[in-house]
Amino acid sequence: MGTLAGQTAIVTGSSSGIGQGIAERLAQEGANVVIDYVGGPDGAQETLKKVEAAGAKGVIVEADVSQLDAVRKLVNATWQAFGGADILVNNAGVEKEAPFWEVTEQEYDFVLGVNLKGPFFLTQAFVQRLIEAKKPGRVINISSVHEDMAFPNFATYCASKGGVRMLMRDLAVELGPLGITVNNVAPGAISTPINTALLENKPKLNALLKNIPLGRLGTVDDVAGLVAYLASDAAAYVNGSTFVIDGGLMRNYHEQ
């Protein structure tokens, strides 16, 4: 029996990368998984195969977390499929590179919509259901080292992740009395498809690796293991914290 046997987890943006790894790991721990994606369904189908191969049940829901009707659809579909949920992982995230003075309103709305509005209202919909059922729960946000660390040319991303940091702290206090814990996982440089360009740019990659005391990029499994811990009973007294997972990058980083 896994540490999450009999529980259900919603994992947003779980058709690839970190989200896919989290879905698979939670399934290995015994949880049913609701796989959320946008766009093409191929990645979500791949995640479902991994979840089922781990011996768990999964369902796929297409839902753009920046849209309130889609957020409610995602929660409703979860309750219809599994009769409830115990764990919410707000993983879906986007970034747009641009000098601050060139950022458009459309870019701002896109990044803040997915990265901050999404977790805000999806957590709200999740918590409303928990309150109705008088059940405890776990909220785990996949944030970033940039909830705390400057990232020139990514002002929208930094603003969104800084917002997620403060939202987590506020909700930990507000929802704690209901038995609902809220924590952030803040990855640094992780080897995922979104970082393909970096991985192929050897001089840039080597410069980054020099800034990471452990001398390597993180893996999806590194992040997924931390999420599995926060979702488990071992983390029952953990609330209102950000867990940085960056190989020491944040403590050693300086702009080139």
Image (spheres, grey):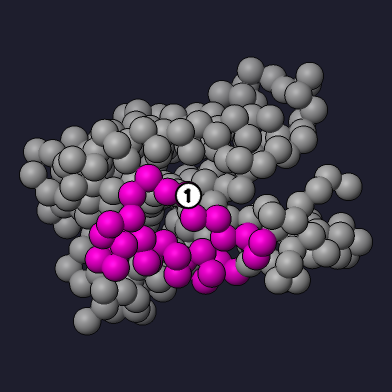
Residue marked by disc 1: 242
Q: Is residue 244 magenta?
A: yes
Residue 40 or residue 232, whichever sits in front: 232
Residue 153 in percent (x, y) is at 77, 33
Q: Is residue 110 left or right of residue 21?
A: right
Q: Position of residue 174 (x, y in %)?
A: 26, 33
- In the rendered view of the protein, which quadrant contains the N terminus? bottom left
**Figure disc tally:** 1
108 sits left or right of 231 in the view? right
User: Left or right: where does residue 224 sit relative to residue 136?
Assistant: right
Query: Dividing the picture into quarters, in which one does residue 245 lie?
Result: bottom right
Please say whether residue 233 is one of the residues in the magenta stretch. Answer: yes
Viewed as shown, does residue 107 lie left or right of 7?
A: right
Residue beneath the point at 72% across and 22% down: 103
Q: Position of residue 180 (x, y in %)?
A: 23, 46
Name the residue rendered at 37%, 45% in the picture: 240
One can see residue 59 in this view: no
Give the vertical position of 15 relative to 126 (above or below): below
The magenta segment is 219-248
Kindly give the residue lying farthest to the right in the view shown.
Answer: 203
Instruction: Let me know if residue 35 appears in the view.
Output: yes
Q: Residue 237 appears at what percent x and percent y?
A: 28, 57
